Amino acid sequence: MRSYSTFTLNAILFLIALNVLIFIVTLVRPDAIFFLGLQPANFLHRPWTIITNLFVHGSFGHIFFNMISLYFLGSFFTKLVGEKNFLKIYFAGGVLGNIFYLLLASPFSVGIGASGAIFALGGALAIMAPKIPVFIFFIPVPVPLWAAMALFLIISFLFRGIAWQAHLGGLILGLVAGYFFKKKRRAYYI
């Protein structure tokens, strides 16, 4: 049995720092959002945006909530599966979320944010440890992680300007990954 007792936050803190740095760049140069953001109509001319858009955020609230979620979900997920698997699921969820965005979003919309990658982490954890209690800012009592993920997905569909396509793609990847991690190591039951 493999142990991940040497847990560190290196990858998570690096991702948070990179997101914050790019957010500062976009405050100084707002046009960078269109250069780094994913736009279906321009994807063939800017294929790098399938990755770079994961580091771009449109407002302080957007980056704040994504980075808080990355820190908490990422920390727990990394403790369970290790840093290498964390990075695989994070980026695979982000890319699959972006593929959903390319296929289902308006061709001239610009998708930005790490939400698809974060939904992948949440989806995996919702399968591996569904009863973990989490706090949601507007609910005064903890709710099970699976319910929180379902609530956030529903909210994605209700408000304009949220890339529900990326959330859905990331969540699907996370659910599948969580199933395989749980099946591989039954110790994930909580």
Image (cartoon, helix red, strand yellow):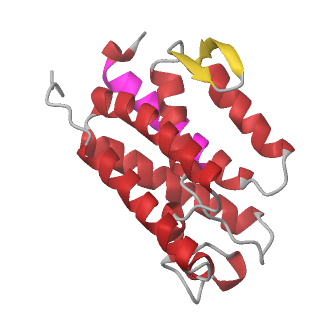
| Quadrant (top left, top right, bottom left, bottom right) of the N terminus | top left
Q: Residue at (45%, 54%) from the top-left corner?
A: 92
Q: Is residue 175 magenta?
A: yes
Taking the spot 84% from the left edge, 47% from the top edge, the residue there is 159
Residue 44: x %, y % from top left: 59, 86
Q: Give the image location of residue 27, x and y in percent.
A: 56, 71
Picture coordinates of residue 76, whole percent (x, y): 37, 27
**Count of residue discs:** 0
132 or 10: which is nearer to us?
10
Give the extent of the magenta segment. Answer: 169-185
172 on left or right of 182: right
Q: Please give left or right for residue 160 compared with residue 54 in the image.
A: right
Residue closer to the observer: 77 or 57: 57
Image quarter of the C terminus: top left
- Note whether residue 69 is visible: yes
Left or right: residue 189 compared with residue 115: left
Residue found at the very far bottom of the displayed protein: 45
Tell me if 96 is positioned left or right of 21 in this view. Answer: right
